[in-house]
Amino acid sequence: MKCRIYPKEEIKTKWLVFGLLFTPSIKTQVWRIFSIKGIPLGFIKWFSRWRCYAFFPENETIFNSECLKDIKEFIDNLIKEHNTNYQI
């Protein structure tokens, strides 16, 4: 899958950076998560079996509760936006 990060679609928290990927062949959004130092940590993308966005971490990554809270809140917002757009 070819993708690139939209330069203006970047959301930062205290420790994480969420970058929206440009994926022309996919209907739902794909977000790449990096540490504030630029280390790739995983993806947030649509998981069709669960009909919601989910977090797909990179191998051998470790997260504390603050990072997990930021990821959860980010996913909750994506799901809310998706449900509003598709009126579910």
Image (cartoon, grey):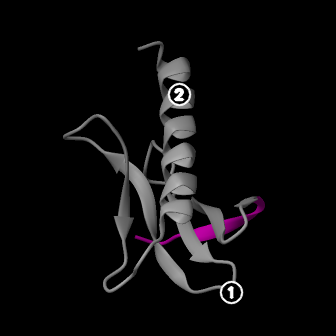
Tell me the residue that label 2 is attached to: 80
* Looking at the image, residue 31 lies above or below residue 29: below
SS under mark 1 = loop
Q: Amino acid at mark 2?
A: Lys
| Tag of residue 17 | none
Residue in view at x 57 percent, y 36 percent: 77
**Residue 64, position in %: x, y?**
48, 70
Q: Nearer the viewer, residue 63 or 4?
A: 63
User: Where does the C terminus fall, quadrant-wise?
Assistant: top left
The residue sitting at the front extreme is 65
Drawn side of residue 2 relative to residue 56, left or right: right
**Residue 44, position in %: x, y?**
45, 57
Circle nearer the N terminus (1, 2) = 1
Drawn side of residue 39 relative to residue 1, left or right: right
Q: Bounds of the magenta span?
A: 1-9
Tell me the residue that label 1 is attached to: 37
Drawn side of residue 21 relative to residue 61, left or right: right
- Distance, label 1 to label 2, CA atoms, is 29 Å
Residue in view at x 25 percent, y 41 percent: 48
Q: Amino acid at mark 1?
A: Lys
At label 2, counting other C-alpha atoms closer than 10 Å, the crowd grade (few under 14, some 14-19, many 20 or more) is: some
User: Where does the N terminus fall, quadrant-wise?
Assistant: bottom left
**Residue 53, position in %: x, y?**
39, 44
Residue in view at x 37 percent, y 78 percent: 58
